[in-house]
């Protein structure tokens, strides 16, 4: 037997017992007459001790130990004279009788403890060592717990967990595909799924009624903190349901997870139409933990010969509470912030509502105190507040104000990690005009059904058709999204047409689905949650990388295994790719 107990198990009740532990040497403190060793495993840390009563042999053995050696330690549990109240095993220690090195370690490149001295790069390269740290491992434990609870809930609701293939053909979800060359079918490629979308719809046609899968998806996109080239979804589909049934089921799942994992009771999730989210929050993923709503000031501010406003399509503003004493420097910095290319505003107009009730603005030349008071009324500003205005193209400025609101919310510490504000954003537009390609793109994906009442607009005003699509948003993070699907061949075909597919292209790529629609397709709808995002939200982390065991870096590289990498000439030959590469 390797061990009688784990390193997190021994308590005062075990005093006097002979035990055997196995684990990693975290720290050795040599105090001359006495030596302490912190032995660590997944479950905790137990102190081992040798003193003047110990044999010479055991002292010699200890001398050979180093950090991260794997050892087996046998001894008697005793009460500590100097108790450590910070750890559960802190009242006891094991008086060492015997020691066995199971595996030595060379010097680790960083310290394996919560406040490690290792930087990001080195910890990614030695991820298996980083995963030894409790702070990192506990995120993965949380992940496992959440996956388990998800299965419990969905199995309990009659969902069938079904695996779908990973080597498939391209499904457009708005990103680039990762492709895999086929050796047996030279010149042809598989695509890795951006999601199991078409397969889950086929499972509905197959009569599965309720499907789910915790599944890897792949998207070849530029990376950000909350994106990885491969990520995990809780992917679901249901038959004979309407939007509200899907929302109810998945609100149920979300609340179940909050309760099971965090012991939190969350109120019912409010519904917010997409148009309202954009108007008030400048974002389709509003962070509703704080107000600071965007107000349209276009009518209020025009007509004072301030050309910037008079010529603008839209003038919008937010009111930052208690910021009227922002310094010139702070305002300049904020102005530069909104002018960054990512935000793209031309400038920032500010109005300080001073504590004495007067106003000081960057447009005092054009507006009287009376005028500014009107703005304050619209914005519900009080003395001590700061009004921030942006002007220009409506859509662009709403987004910019949304970013500014988010930024001010962060600066004012209004985004409390311990508060969770979920909501459903509904009634998304079906289509989105893309300037670059000069055609409509599906806002969700091409299988999303238009709202019945907007169906007649499809021919005359496609841009204004709303979809039966919904997103779950929590604290400004899009946790999931889905839609009621098209289940009729003709409508699906019209949809591809609106998206600029020729008949042949549509047939070529999605003939299998449209053909399946002809064999009795049930009405169906579904949703997918971004599992990594959900876990990082629960963990209070900003990056999904921290909840993935072996993540990739910002350049999409796994620096530990050094991938992607070139492959051998023979492999290229077999795939008949070599010639093409050489031709370039
Ligand atoms: N397949 C969609 C996605 O990955 C989710 C869905 O519509 O169910 O976003």
Image (cartoon, rainbow, N blue to C red):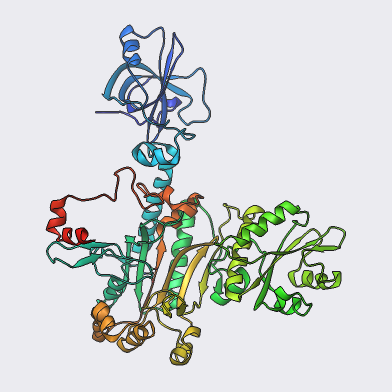
Residue ranking furthest to the front: 583
Percent x, y of residue 37: 40, 21
Percent x, y of residue 209: 31, 74
Work out whether residue 289 can be spotted.
Answer: no
Tell me the quarter of the image containing the C terminus. Answer: bottom left
Which of the two residues, 311 or 223, is positioned nearer the viewer here? Answer: 311
Side of 317 relative to 96 (left or right): right
**In the image, what residue occupies the spot 32% across and 42% down?**
560
**In the image, what residue occupies the spot 87% across and 59% down?**
356
Which of the two residues, 434 or 35, is positioned nearer the viewer here? Answer: 434
**In the image, what residue occupies the spot 70% across and 56% down?**
332
Side of 562 relative to 267 (left or right): left
Count numbered badges in the picture: 0
Work out whether residue 98 can be spotted.
Answer: yes
Tell me: residue 364, above or below residue 430: above
Tell me: residue 243, above or below residue 569: below
Tell me the quarter of the image containing the N terminus. Answer: top left
Which of the two residues, 260 or 134, is positioned nearer the viewer here? Answer: 134
Which of the two residues, 98 or 359, is positioned nearer the viewer here? Answer: 359
Q: Quadrant of residue 419?
A: bottom right
Side of 85 relative to 378 (left or right): left
**In the image, what residue occupies the spot 31% across and 24% down?**
71
Side of 498 relative to 518 (left or right): right
Percent x, y of residue 133: 41, 36
Tell me: residue 384, above or below residue 204: above
Please state the quadrant of the image where ligand 1 appears. bottom left
Percent x, y of residue 484: 40, 78
């Amino acid at each position: 037997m390797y061990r009688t107990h784990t390193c997190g198990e021994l308590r005062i009740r075990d005093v006097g017992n002979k035990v055997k532990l196995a684990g990693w040497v975290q720290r050795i403190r040599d105090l001359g007459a006495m030596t302490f060793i912190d032995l660590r495993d997944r479950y905790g840390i137990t102190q081992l001790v040798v003193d003047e009563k110990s044999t010479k042999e055991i002292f010699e053995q200890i001398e050979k130990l180093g950090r991260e050696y794997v050892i087996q330690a046998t001894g008697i549990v005793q009460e500590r004279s100097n108790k450590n109240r910070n750890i559960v095993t802190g009242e006891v220690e094991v008086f060492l009788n015997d020691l066995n090195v199971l595996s030595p370690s060379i010097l680790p490149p960083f310290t394996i403890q919560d406040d490690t001295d290792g930087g990001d790069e080195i910890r990614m390269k030695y991820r298996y060592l980083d995963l030894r740290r409790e702070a990192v491992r506990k995120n993965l434990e949380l992940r496992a717990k959440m996956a388990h609870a998800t299965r419990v809930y969905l199995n309990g609701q009659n969902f069938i967990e079904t695996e779908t293939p990973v080597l498939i053909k391209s499904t457009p979800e708005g990103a680039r595909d990762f492709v895999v060359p086929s050796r047996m079918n030279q010149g042809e490629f598989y695509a890795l799924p951006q999601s199991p979308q078409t397969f889950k719809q086929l499972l509905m046609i197959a009569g599965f009624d309720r499907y789910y899968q915790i599944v890897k998806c792949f998207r070849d996109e530029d990376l950000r903190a909350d994106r990885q080239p491969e990520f995990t979804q809780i992917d679901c589909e249901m038959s004979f349901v309407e939007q509200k049934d899907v929302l109810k089921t998945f609100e149920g799942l979300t609340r179940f997870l909050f309760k099971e994992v965090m012991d939190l009771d969350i109120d019912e999730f409010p519904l917010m139409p997409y148009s309202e989210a954009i108007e008030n929050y400048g974002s389709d993923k509003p962070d509703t933990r704080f107000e600071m709503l965007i107000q349209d000031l276009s009518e209020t501010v025009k007509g004072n010969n301030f050309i910037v406003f008079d010529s603008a399509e839209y003038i919008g503003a937010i009111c930052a509470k208690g910021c009227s004493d922002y310094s010139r420097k702070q305002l300049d910095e904020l102005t530069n912030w909104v002018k960054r290319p990512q935000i793209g505003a031309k400038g920032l107009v500010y109005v300080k509502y001073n504590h004495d009730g007067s106003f000081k603005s960057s447009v005092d030349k054009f507006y009287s105190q009376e005028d500014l008071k009107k703005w304050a009324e619209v914005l519900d500003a009080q003395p001590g507040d700061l009004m921030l205005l942006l002007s220009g193209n409506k859509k662009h400025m709403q987004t910019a104000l949304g970013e500014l609101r988010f930024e001010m919310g962060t600066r004012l510490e209004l985004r409390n990690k311990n508060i969770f504000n979920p909501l459903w954003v509904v009634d998304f537009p079906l289509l989105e005009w893309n300037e670059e390609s000069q055609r409509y793109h599906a806002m969700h994906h091409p299988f999303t059904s238009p709202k019945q009442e907007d169906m007649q607009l499809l021919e005359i005003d496609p841009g204004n058709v709303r979809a039966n699509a919904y997103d779950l948003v929590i604290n400004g993070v899009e946790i999931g999204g889905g839609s009621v699907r098209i289940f009729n061949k003709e409508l699906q075909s019209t949809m591809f047409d609106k998206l600029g597919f020729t008949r042949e292209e549509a047939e070529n790529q999605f003939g299998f689905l449209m053909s399946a629609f002809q064999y009795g397709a049930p009405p169906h709808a579904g949703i997918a949650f971004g599992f990594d995002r959900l876990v990082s939200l629960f963990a209070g982390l900003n990056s999904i990388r921290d909840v993935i065991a072996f993540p990739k870096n910002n350049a999409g590289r796994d620096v530990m295994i050094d991938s992607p990498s070139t492959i051998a000439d023979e492999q290229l030959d077999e795939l008949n790719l070599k010639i093409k590469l050489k031709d370039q």
